[in-house]
Image (cartoon, grey):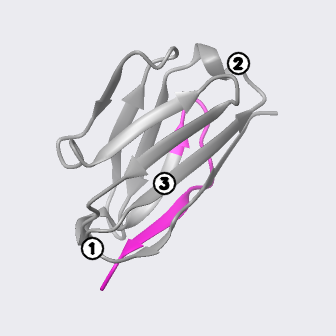
Amino acid sequence: QVQLVESGGGLVQPGGSLRLSCAASGFTFSSWWMFWVRQAPGKGLEWVAVISPSGGFTDSAESVKGRFTISRDNARNTLWLQMDRLKFDDTARYYCTNLNDWGQGTQVTVSS
């Protein structure tokens, strides 16, 4: 049974940082491209970042480029998203996904 369990969300002030984690199980994590996707209130899904199976390739959306960093540890079946210099517009529910399976998401709220 595939499971993707996100954690690390919360309430943070603008300019602050959070590190999201995604614990994966039930599939060969090291073989899959992994993504972070977010959904802001009242809006559609927005791709945030992607990482290749080996971790050697990463990319991120222009809206977060230079502020968010995606990484993974295949030995621990874990995906991370380091989020720095957070902005109000980063408020959203964040999901990790291999595009075949999705976690339940973790809420990030940026507010003063």
Task: Tell which tag, 2 or 3, sits nearer the viewer.
Answer: 3
Q: Which residues are drawn in magenta?
A: 96-112
- Element at badge 2? loop
Marks 1 and 2 sit apart, C-alpha to C-alpha, by 37 Å
Looking at this view, name the residue that lies furthest to the right: 1
Give coordinates of residue 55: x percent, y percent: 46, 20
Question: Which one is nearer the viewer's eye here, 34 or 86?
Answer: 86
Query: Amino acid type of disc 2?
Result: Thr
Residue 38 is left or right of residue 2, and the answer is left
The C terminus, quarter of image: bottom left
Question: Would you name the residue on which mark 1 appears?
Answer: 14
Question: Would you name the residue on which mark 3 appears?
Answer: 19
Query: Amino acid type of disc 3?
Result: Arg
The residue that appears at 34% across and 69% down in the rendered structure is: 42
Give coordinates of residue 4: x percent, y percent: 67, 42
Tags 3 and 1 touching, CB below 8 Å = no
The residue that appears at 24% across and 40% down in the rendered structure is: 61
Question: Which one is nearer the viewer's eye here, 35 or 12?
Answer: 12
The N terminus, quarter of image: top right
Say whether disc 2 or disc 3 marks the residue closer to the N-terminus.
Answer: 3
The residue that appears at 41% across and 37% down in the rendered structure is: 70
Residue 108 is left or right of residue 97, and the answer is left
Q: Is residue 49 above or below residue 93?
A: above
Marks 2 and 3 sit apart, C-alpha to C-alpha, by 23 Å
Residue 99 on the magenta span: yes
Marks 3 and 1 sit apart, C-alpha to C-alpha, by 15 Å
Give coordinates of residue 47: x percent, y percent: 34, 42
